Image (tube, helix red, strand yellow):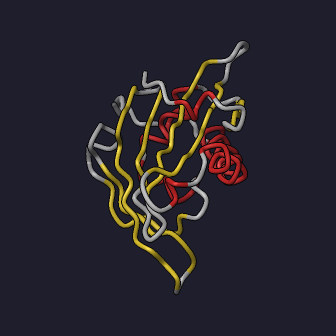
Amino acid sequence: MAEHLEIESSLTVKRDTEASREQVWAVIADGWTYSQWVVGNSRMRAVDPNWPQVGSSIRHSVGVWPLLLDDLTVVQECVPKRELVLLAKGRPLGKARITIRLFDVDGGGCRIEMSEVPVGAPMGWVPQRVALAAAFPRNRECTWRLAAIAERRTPAEMPSHDSE
């Protein structure tokens, strides 16, 4: 797994869910659900058929109509059912690296950990601790939504093949 400093921060969002790691991963691996659980995303435009393999991307829009910006998010690293590192190429504010990790918890269920830091200009100039603090409320809501969707998925709704 990649070792990114931001995921070790006390500002990393951590959420436990009754959903299994497999259920949470099934939501993440279905790129078309991205706008349902990622705060600020308003619509999906395209999902690569090999999502979430490294190098694959999703195209989505950010904002509220009529002020929509087209965005592209690319998978940088992927360890299926464990870790996903994304590079969101939002304009005009620059790029952000989002790290999502999944862990089994005692008694069943899963822990979701999520952090987001800007990379590159202009937002990459913001100190990392400030950037993590700014993203914390948004990521808290993202993990809540992700967990809620995963908890409501039945085995019949999960893909019959591994989305790896």
Instruction: Say if 133 sits above or below 41 in the image.
Output: above
The residue located at (62%, 32%) in the rendering is: 112
Q: Which residue is at the front of the view, 14 or 34?
A: 14
What percent of the width, then of the height, locates residue 113? 62, 33
Q: Which residue is at the front of the view, 157 or 132?
A: 132
The residue located at (51%, 27%) in the rendering is: 22
Query: Does residue 108 appear to the left or right of 161 in the view shown?
Result: right
What percent of the width, then of the height, locates residue 51? 32, 44
Q: Which residue is at the front of the view, 96 or 128?
A: 128
Q: Quadrant of residue 29?
A: top left
Task: Say how many tags the image has.
Answer: 0
Instruction: Say if 32 sits above or below 147 in the image.
Output: below
Query: Does residue 122 appear to the left or right of 56 in the view shown?
Result: right
Q: Which residue is at the front of the view, 116 or 142?
A: 116
The residue located at (65%, 51%) in the rendering is: 135
Q: Residue furthest bottom?
A: 66
What percent of the width, then of the height, locates residue 164? 33, 30
What percent of the width, then of the height, locates residue 32? 43, 55
For the N terminus, which image quadrant? top left
Q: Residue furthest top?
A: 106
